[in-house]
Amino acid sequence: MTDSLLRRKTIVPDRQEGHGLARTLGWPHLVALGVGAIVGTGILTLIGVGADKAGPAVIVSFLVAGLICACAALAYAEMATMIPASGSAYTYSYVVIGELIAWIVGWSLILEYSLVVSAVAVGWSGYAAPLLQAWANVPMDLMQGPELGGIVNLPAIAIIAVVAGMLLYGTRESATVNAILVVVKIIALAVFVAVALPAFDAANLEPFSPFGFAKHVAPDGVERGIMAAAAIIFFAFYGFDAIATAAEEAKNPDRDLKIGIVGSMLACVAIYVLVAVAAVGAISYSKFANSPEPLALILRELGQPLAAKYLAISAIVALPTVILAFFFGQSRIFFTMARDGLLPKGLARISGRGTPVRITIFTAIVVAILAGFIPLDELAALANAGTLAAFTAVSLCMLIMRRRAPDAPRTFRTPMPWVVGGIAVLGCLYLFFSLPAKTQIWFGIWNVAGLAVYFAYARRNAVAG
């Protein structure tokens, strides 16, 4: 039994007839996919949550989360070029560590991507619902989930259906549309910085760190501190791992993957820190803390209502890029696990256009149910827990391969691997324990359920070779 739990995948990638993905993506598509996933609801909404937990020191929280994510991104880049196969952290864990750990990582990624896609769809619906009510007189009961007193969130389900249709039409075509929408999103953030930065006042940074560094429960019962903010803001940075799930669809994986992963991560760290500095310097953090639309609020406080409206419209237009990137990653994780036999193998069939039709439709149904009917307020942090587990596994895989096969071909080599890998592993673990205790408990329950599925079905049907 122990041998089967630790068996490792040896043939990568499995490109059997009907199970091979079409290579249609160049590095510009991959960079856009990464930036599209990273720059989204995180910077548009979580800066307010982070400011509530850390005050002006939310800038440090962004730097801490960005540093840990950057170290994990370097590990991803090395593993992606060594193992250019679909499946991301799941596949690397299967090849390097073994089947049981791979299943736990894959199960965690399913949790991450499902919650992110659903949460972003609900967030998009929040922007779109007022327009739909004004233009089409759609009842609010049909635009809000049960958590807000409605029946079903139809806009959220509709945007998931549109994105699924794009992915079914073709990977390259959907990636091209994604690249265009990413430009719209970057321009909107540039407008924010251009308006807010000239209003910078150092007095707004005092006191800089009112809640200290480590996570602690403040007198009002809220968990605060720079690391408490970083553990939530972490949501705003991940997304580059969606690039690794596209490894089998990259035209030149040895070159394109490292450019896509490292390039998108560096670009987004720079964007986030600049936006954070502009935000906390423009007005007192207390005015936008916990606001659902902090950047638009800041622009209105500065007497720029047109710029605020432009930012909101840009969010409606461009937020689907986040849905697309994570939907893409989710379907590829499902696809790879099905191809390995851990999920029903029939789900891994490929269409004539080289896209996994069945798994994309299945993924759409799952995330649409979550977005349409399930309250996600407290469960959203679970996405961070799943991601931290995956990032830890990839960083460990990189370190294990440096010890096991130091001379194996690597088209990208992580600089100072033991330092970078150590920061990634220890940083992810620290952030995990900085998450709310309730989140850690739910993550444990999710993985207990996952182990039940593994021993009941996946272990007996797995095809490791």
Image (spheres, grey):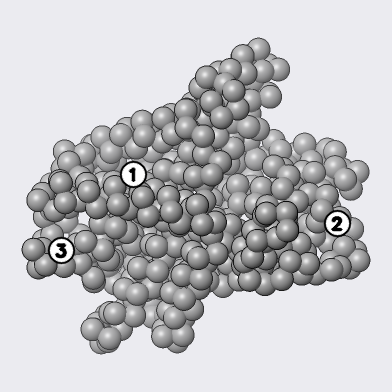
Please indicate, yes or no, whether residue 279 appears anywhere in the rendered image: yes
Q: Which residue sits at x=64%, y=65%? A: 216
Q: Which residue sits at x=58%, y=67%? A: 65
Three-letter amino acid code at the position of disc 2: Ser
Q: Residues within 10 Å of mark 2 (few under 14, many from 20)?
A: some
Residue 245 — which label? none
Q: Which residue sits at x=23%, y=84%? A: 404
Q: Secondary structure at mark 3?
A: helix
Q: Secondary structure at mark 1?
A: helix
Circles 1 and 3: CB distance less than 8 Å?
no
Quick one: label 1 or label 3, which is nearer the N terminus? 3
| 298 sits left or right of 113 in the view | right
Tell me: residue 70, above or below residue 50. Answer: below
Q: Quadrant for the N terminus, please.
A: bottom left
Residue ID for mark 2 = 284
Tell me: residue 366, above or below residue 194. Answer: above
Mark 1 or mark 3, which is nearer to you? 3
Q: Which residue sits at x=42%, y=79%? A: 421
Residue 5 — which label? 3
In space, the residues marked 3 and 2 are separated at their CA atoms by: 54 Å
Quick one: label 2 or label 1, which is nearer the N terminus? 2
Three-letter amino acid code at the position of disc 3: Leu
Residue ID for mark 1 = 331
Provide residue 99's location: percent of width, then percent of height: 19, 62
Q: Quadrant for the C terminus, please.
A: bottom left
Of residues 441 and 113, the one nearer the viewer is 441
Q: Residues within 10 Å of mark 1 (few under 14, many from 20)?
A: many
Q: Secondary structure at mark 2?
A: loop
